Amino acid sequence: MGSVELCYILNRNITIYRGVHLDIIILGGFLGSGKTTLLQQLLQYQQSQGLKTYVLMNEFGQYSVDHLLVDDDVPLKKLLNGCICCDLKVDVEIQLHQLYLLHQPDCIIIESSGVAHPVEILDACLSPVLAPFTTIKALIGVIDGTLIQRFSILTADIKQLLIEQIKYCSTLLINKSDQLGDELEKVISDVRQIASTNQIIETQYCQLDDINVLFKNSVSSDYETTSRRSHSGIKSISCKLGRPLDAEQFAEWLEQLPSSIFRIKGILSFTEKPDTLYLVQYTNGTIETREIPIKIPPYLVIIGEQMDKESIKDEIEHMQ
């Protein structure tokens, strides 16, 4: 335990103020909605304004993938193997306070896991320790429009999670709007019935003409929080890969996945090019692959409901 963390624990009710005000931006949204894509744009904007910005990134599983999409020169801390809104909620407060004490950034951007309840993160950021020197600049929700399109067939737990991810945001992005066709207006209408904000923006790949539109609305302090929230139905499976996968078998496996598996991401190699590593991301039937120049041990993270861990690991083993 570091001296700063020890000081924090022993003096939990004492705010140490360094004379610098801190803005906090919270990014929420379901798995694969486009949060990291928006994060990249936010970081470019912050850099163009000469603002010293740190990132606090939460991944539900044991390994982090999304941090590989952030430039190496961006200071970033990872919170792994749990959800930032429940298991790691106290860690959020500690990490934010440590970053403030040690580095005095102008802004910290929190990217939550895809199963987080944003209002719980907001609750952690409004603790008595942080409140005197922080402002919640925005609580931004990124919505996968295709998921709202299929809302009626989702499980009750996922429906409730999506509602809570939408309800209290100061700004909402309906992403993947180009995939909605004639149902776009219905999706917007459905979101408006849940949202407490009128700031709802349609996007493709989270592209915005003016990033400042994200900060026009203030963050509401009128919310409810409860410690009884959990993600008991949502699990993650982490698989280390000892050998390259057969690309054709992997593609067929993805096509046959049940709808209860929401997200797969990882670093892998394929038998056709065993010395090349790829960043692989799968969401709701869509797969993206990208060659990456780094050398790290390959792995996969699978997130979903009602998963048979041993069966999935056996299936992956047979593809190697």
Image (cartoon, rainbow, N blue to C red):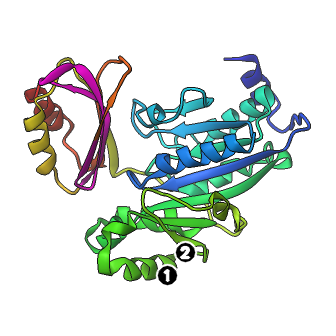
Q: Could you tell me which residue is drawn at 10 percent across and 29 percent down?
A: 246
Residue 163 or residue 252, whichever sits in front: 252
Where does residue 75 sit, x and y in percent of width and height?
63, 29
| Type of the residue with mark 2 | Ala
Q: Relative to the observer, which residue lies in front, 304 or 183? A: 183
Q: Which residue is mark 1?
A: 193
Query: Regarding mark 2 in the picture, which secondary structure is present there?
Result: loop
Above or below, comparing residue 237 to residue 197 in the picture: above
Residue type at tag 1 = Gln
Which residue occupies 21% across, 37% down? 309
| Image marks 1 and 2: residues in contact by CB distance under 8 Å | yes
Q: Residue at the location (29% across, 70% down)? A: 150
> Mark on residue 195?
2
Q: Which residues are magenta?
A: 260-288
Q: Is residue 226 visible?
A: no
Going by the image, does 91 lie left or right of 268? right
Residue 122 picture location, percent across and down: 65, 54
